[in-house]
Image (cartoon, helix red, strand yellow):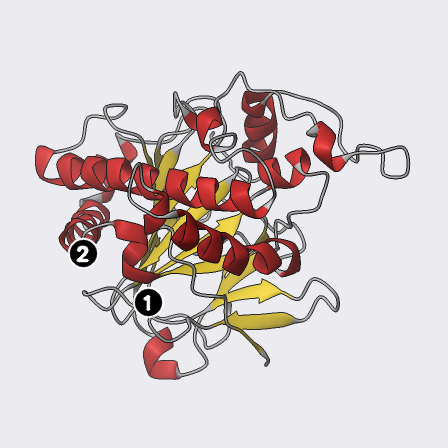
């Protein structure tokens, strides 16, 4: 199995007023090749999110998934347009070629949209806020790497009405190298993916040329103070805007090859940073020409995300 090591890209210089032009140019240049080659970046220091915020959020989702099943079902996911709530084991199947649904349970979180205990809601809301700031900084970096105005991508997330924090639990006891999350691309602009300290490995990305699955391994310097790792991967909305120039790479999660690691539960937090629902996903004119006409039909971000969610999630 070959390895994909994303470049280390420091987006903290893209927080408002935080960085110099030299720092921004260096980060954008580091992101430029990755956008087109495989669509994954590694962020030092969780992209500027305080480690204590990340640790508190992981503690919260462990408490959330430890709740009695009947309590979790009271918070059940109801509708792809609302896109919040609890999704039980066996209700998602992103890769239709797989024989069985994914062995994972999920809670789709957006602040104030489900009545959670305060000790769970508040740390998740804090991470959502900090994660949106880091994601918008990443979008400013990506915009500069694409020779777009720095705020063009981030401005499309002003209302954050499609953005969610996806809390994922992969139960332990999996067979080594068995599928935990089927192959898929993410639907939005970018995803901020947070792995806990010592979290079992298993994230894989498809090689854009050969289709071979490659283990995603963080570069030196990627771990935060808590030992966790943060990635940004690009999504379908950005691919549509750039007429396929930015790649939304298929990725999946498998259980580790080591049987002891495969026996462990794994928790992951993924903040989906999406364009606002009313935003048009028509290709930006900078990425089309007579020789390269638009690859995608225009549609709103809200319609696009609802269409994609309906394809993977059973709600009845």
Residue that label 2 marks: 51
Q: Residue at x 17, y 35 (%)?
A: 121
Residue closest to the eye, 38 or 171: 38
Q: Position of residue 202 (x, y in %)?
A: 45, 69
**In the displayed structure image, the side of residue 66 where residue 279 appears, left or right:** right
Q: Vertically, is 220 above or below 90?
A: below
Instruction: Tell me, yes or no, if residue 93 can be seen here.
Output: no
- In the image, residue 309 lies at what x, y percent? 54, 34
Looking at the picture, how far across and down is residue 307, in whole percent?
61, 28
Q: Callout 1: helix, strand or loop?
A: loop
Which residue is located at x 43 percent, y 37 percent?
273
- In terms of depth relative to the viewer, which is nearer, 290 or 303? 290
Direction from residue 125 to residue 161 in the image, left or right: right
Of the two numbered discs 1 and 2 on the same chain, state the one appearing first in sequence.
2
- Which quadrant of the view contains residue 237? top right
Q: Quote the CA–CA distance across marks 1 and 2.
A: 25 Å
Near mark 2 (Cα within 10 A), the count class, few <14, some 14-19 or many ≥20, is: some
Q: Image quadrant for the N terminus?
A: bottom right
* Residue at far right of view: 291
Note whether residue 247 is visible.
yes
The residue that label 1 is drawn on is: 172
Q: Are marks 1 and 2 in contact (CB under 8 Å)?
A: no
């Amino acid at each position: 199995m070959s390895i994909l090591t994303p470049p280390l890209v420091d987006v903290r210089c893209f927080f408002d007023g935080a960085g110099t032009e030299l720092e921004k140019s260096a980060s954008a240049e580091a992101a430029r090749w990755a956008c087109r080659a495989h669509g994954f970046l590694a962020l030092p220091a969780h992209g500027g999110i305080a480690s204590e915020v990340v640790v508190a959020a992981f503690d919260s989702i462990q408490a959330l998934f430890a709740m009695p099943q009947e309590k979790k079902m009271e918070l059940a996911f109801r509708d792809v347009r609302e896109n919040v709530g609890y999704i039980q084991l066996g209700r998602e199947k992103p890769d239709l070629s797989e024989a069985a649904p994914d062995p994972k349970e999920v809670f789709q979180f957006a602040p104030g949209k489900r009545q959670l205990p305060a000790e769970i809601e508040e740390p998740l809301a804090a991470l959502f806020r900090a994660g949106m700031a880091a994601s918008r900084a990443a979008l400013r970096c990506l915009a500069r790497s694409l020779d777009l105005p720095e705020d063009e991508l981030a401005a499309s997330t002003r209302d954050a009405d499609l953005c969610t924090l996806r809390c994922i639990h992969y139960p332990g006891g999996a067979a080594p190298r068995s599928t935990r999350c089927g192959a898929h691309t993410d639907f939005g602009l970018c995803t901020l993916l947070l792995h806990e300290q010592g979290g079992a490995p298993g994230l894989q990305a498809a090689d854009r040329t050969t289709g071979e699955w490659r283990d995603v391994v963080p570069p030196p310097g990627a771990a935060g103070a808590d030992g966790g790792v943060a990635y940004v991967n690009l999504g379908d909305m950005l691919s549509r805007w750039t007429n396929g120039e930015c790649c939304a790479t298929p990725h999946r999660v498998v259980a580790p090859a080591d049987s002891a690691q495969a026996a462990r539960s794994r928790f992951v937090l993924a903040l989906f940073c999406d364009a606002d629902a009313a935003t048009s996903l028509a290709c930006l004119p900078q990425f089309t020409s007579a020789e390269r006409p638009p690859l995608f039909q225009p549609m709103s971000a809200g319609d696009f995300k609802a269409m994609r969610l309906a394809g993977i999630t059973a709600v009845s």
